[in-house]
Image: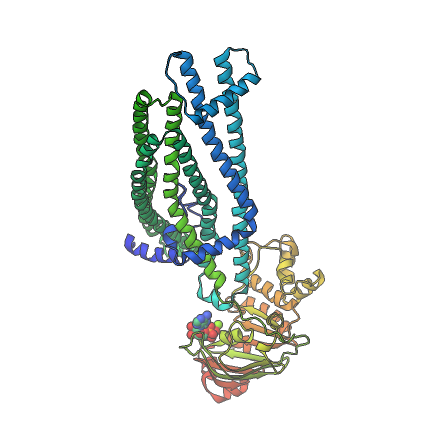
Amino acid sequence: MARTLEQLQRHYNSAAAAHKPNMPPMGRPGGGHGGPRAAGMSGKPKNTKATVSRLIRYMRPYTLRFIGVLLCMLASTVTSLVGAYLLAPIINKLTLAVLPNAAVEMSAAERVADRFIAALTAAGDFGQGEVMNYVLTALLVLGAIYLIGIVTTYLQSRLMLTVSQGITERIRNDLFARLQKLPVQYFDSHPTGEVMSRFTNDIDNVDMMLNNSLTSIVSGAVTLVGTLTFMLTTNWILTLVTVVFVPLLVKGVTAVAGRSRKYYKGQQAALGAVNGYIEETVTGQKVVKVFNHEDECTDEFRLLNDDMRDKQFKAQFWGGVMGPITHNISMISYGVTVGIGGVLMCTAGLTPGALTVFASYSRQFSMPISTLSQQTTVIFAALAGAERVFQVMDADPEAPDAPDAKTADGMRGDVEFKNVTFGYTPDKVVLKNISLYAHPGQKIAFVGSTGAGKTTVTNLLSRFYDIREGSITIDGVDVRDYRRDDLRRNIAMVLQDTHLFSDTVMENIRYGRPDATDEEVVAAAKTASAHSFIMRLQDGYNTRLDGDGANLSQGQRQLLNIARAAISHAPILVLDEATSSVDTRTERHIEVGLSRLMQNRTTLVIAHRLSTVRNADAILVLEQGEIIERGNHEQLLEQKGRYYELYTGKKELD
Ligand SMILES: Nc1ncnc2c1ncn2[C@@H]1O[C@H](COP(=O)(O)OP(=O)(O)O)[C@@H](O)[C@H]1O
Ligand SMILES: [Mg+2]
């Protein structure tokens, strides 16, 4: 039975809101009217002031360029205003040419423009008669002015792009650098997708604000002030008429913007659900097929998709309605201005040129107001995004090494746990009073049911987490007194979850020790019994691995991970269920490699199958965070306790 829309949205939306970046397959959402992505999911910024001042700090290195942007903006706004103004003398001249007796009383500003063109006209001669010469000169001047406008606009957007890209590049770098410093705990408690969406959605929103909103705000403000000044020099009565329409315009825009923001949120939520559903179905395609859920999936997807269409329609509709509404209000304002201007022309000596100029100003005037009101959505989303990015940057990094931290050169691998008690959270104890000792080169095995705390022991040794009580020492030195990188360099790990990078087989193995030579890589592969299968790959050691080694079998991936551990000279080896997800034949193959790897290394081995731990120097049986039995294989069998039960009863743990 397929689920209802509400159920689906509940599942996939919380997932989407929590950790699904708006990545493909749906492409760039909200493309219709260029809105920000995921505004609905990011919510409103909480600490606007701090966020803004932090963003400004990022802008500081670009101060000079930003001033350049402002100057260009100023220049391009002024050119468009002056250009429009030059229409006045042209039209006045033409009016006088057609109606020589018309009473054209030019204002002071118009006279300045007129004299300027007249002076230029006197300098050159197109041989077309007085009026035509005047008009042609004026057109040339206009052309020159608009050319300046084009060049400065181009420079402005280019400069602003370098500024915004530079800022987002630095934010991304800082964010990534911080990620590398965060403790394992951070990644354990934050879904991957959520962390990733800081890099995609959130930074994109900031970028969009820097590129669009910031320039719109500044150029809008400049245009407003400039237009107002020019309008006032032309005619104050008409200026008043235009300004009266501003509140109406603002009201109209904010009303629509509020509505479109609401539906926009809905659109983003629906999009999140669709993306979440697609991601889950694509990654789980095999399971879908095995259980014959194709039809059900299609139906459920239709529901979600249908809902998205609906929400998208509303969002785009209200987004699209904005333009016509502001356009119509400004057209009314325009009409009224021209009407009253006509009356003024007949009664108060307004020149036809001035009226034309004014009409064009009144239209320019309303533009920044509507753009500015539309930008609020983008700005909110960007500030919320920036805040989420800064949250990650502010997360506590791994505690720095003490200034007198020891290097771990020549570590022998003498491991001791003394009365270690630990919990991931303060309220839940996971390991209780654990004590164990491993001589250099010894092999200690952990067995016990799932969740007993075996992996936790290894997490503590490599300081993925720090202990609360007791002590962990290597060669008699507390692990917290070593330099962290040194400590980890001395512990090689092979885990159940393999991980390979998108690179060649050679480089994937070399990851364990970057200065290893090719020969050493091959030797490590031979130790891990990986050499023969690598040679059978298409390009041998130069075969490229993609998508976490998707072109390899699980066992082969594990062999490469073992080779990676083998190449490091670490005296301590941790094997956490290294062979659990492979079949017994492959396991035997892997074990040959593992046993070679364990030679001369202190090994902590956690194994699912008891056959692999039989020859350990000591076996510790862990249950609910406590060591309930310890001894070697024979001793434990004799005890006829939990180990005996596990070994004889089921042979394998659950
Ligand atoms: N990152 C974590 N945060 C909180 N609790 C965890 C974390 N990892 C494991 N645990 C809890 O600690 C206990 C022991 O887990 P673990 O050491 O992984 O068991 P196992 O013996 O199967 O390796 C479990 O109850 C598990 O729920
Ligand atoms: Mg485990």
Q: Nearer the viewer, residue 34 or 356?
A: 356
The quadrant where residue 311 appears = top left
> The N terminus appears in which quarter of the rendering?
bottom left
Q: Nearer the viewer, residue 243 or 617?
A: 243
Relative to 215, residue 39 above or below:
below
The quadrant where residue 226 appears = top left
- The residue under the point 30% across, 34% down is 329
- The residue under the point 56% across, 66% down is 586
Instruction: Report whether residue 24 is seen.
Output: yes
Q: Quadrant of ligand 1?
A: bottom left
User: Residue 620: image x %, image y %?
Assistant: 51, 82
User: Residue 104: image x %, image y %?
Assistant: 39, 18
Relative to 199, residue 358 above or below:
above
Relative to 33, residue 549 above or below:
below
User: Residue 54: image x %, image y %?
Assistant: 48, 56
Q: Nearer the viewer, residue 643 or 136?
A: 136
Q: Nearer the viewer, residue 204 or 228?
A: 228
Instruction: Report whether residue 282 is seen.
Output: no
Asked whether, in this view, residue 402 is left or right of residue 349, the answer is: right
Count how many numbered circles sit on residues in the image.
Answer: 0
Snapshot colouring: rainbow
> The C terminus appears in which quarter of the rendering?
bottom left
User: Residue 639: image x %, image y %?
Assistant: 48, 89
